[in-house]
Image: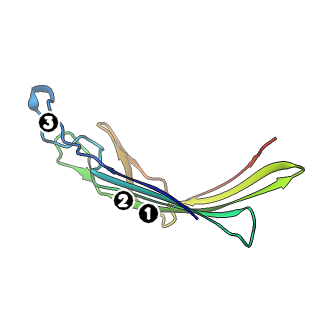
Amino acid sequence: MRLLGGVTFIDPEQTKTLNSMNDRKDAVGVPKVSVVINGEYDIFAVPGLTLTGRISCFGEAQADIANTQSIPGWTTVDAGARYSTKISGNKVTFRANIMNLANKDYWNSVSRSFITMGAPRTALLSATIDF
């Protein structure tokens, strides 16, 4: 089992802005807290098979310079698996992932001119070969 995570704490308060117009207001699109946790678990009964997961949490962020609008915080969960084997002497890895497992609607990011929606539930399949 492997776990890897990170937490970011940011004070997005602006200082020394032009004519002090936005001093003490939060920067656009910057959450105060974000957390990401990744995990992997090897299935010993099936050599080469690993289950994967990820939890992403982002706090509320301001959507405009005046701090009169904001996007709410959000949390998403991703899950997947990968299987590594050899085919004709070459290492091959197959991956299957489902992003945003709960199909949550959320605003992913914001800038001064637009807000983007987060991706809906998305299934991804891939294979890589080393030769």
Alpha carbon of mark 3 to alpha carbon of mark 1: how far? 33 Å
**Vertical placement of residue 76 versus 44, above or below:** above
Name the residue type under label 2.
Answer: Trp
User: Element at badge 2?
Assistant: strand
- Left or right placement of residue 126 versus residue 58 in this view: right
Q: Residue at x 79, y 49 (%)?
A: 91
State which tag comes first along the sequence, 3 or 1: 3
Mark closest to the chain's N terminus, 3 or 2: 3
The local crowd at label 2, few if under 14, some if 14 to 19, many if 20 or more residues have their Cα within 10 Å, is: some
Foreground residue among 41 and 25: 41
Q: Nearer the viewer, mark 1 or mark 2?
A: 2
Checking the image for residue 22, the label placed there is: 3
Q: Amino acid at mark 1?
A: Lys
Q: Which mark is residue 104?
A: 1
Sequence-earlier tag: 1 or 2? 2
- Residue at left offset 88%, top offset 49%: 89
10 to the left or right of 74: left
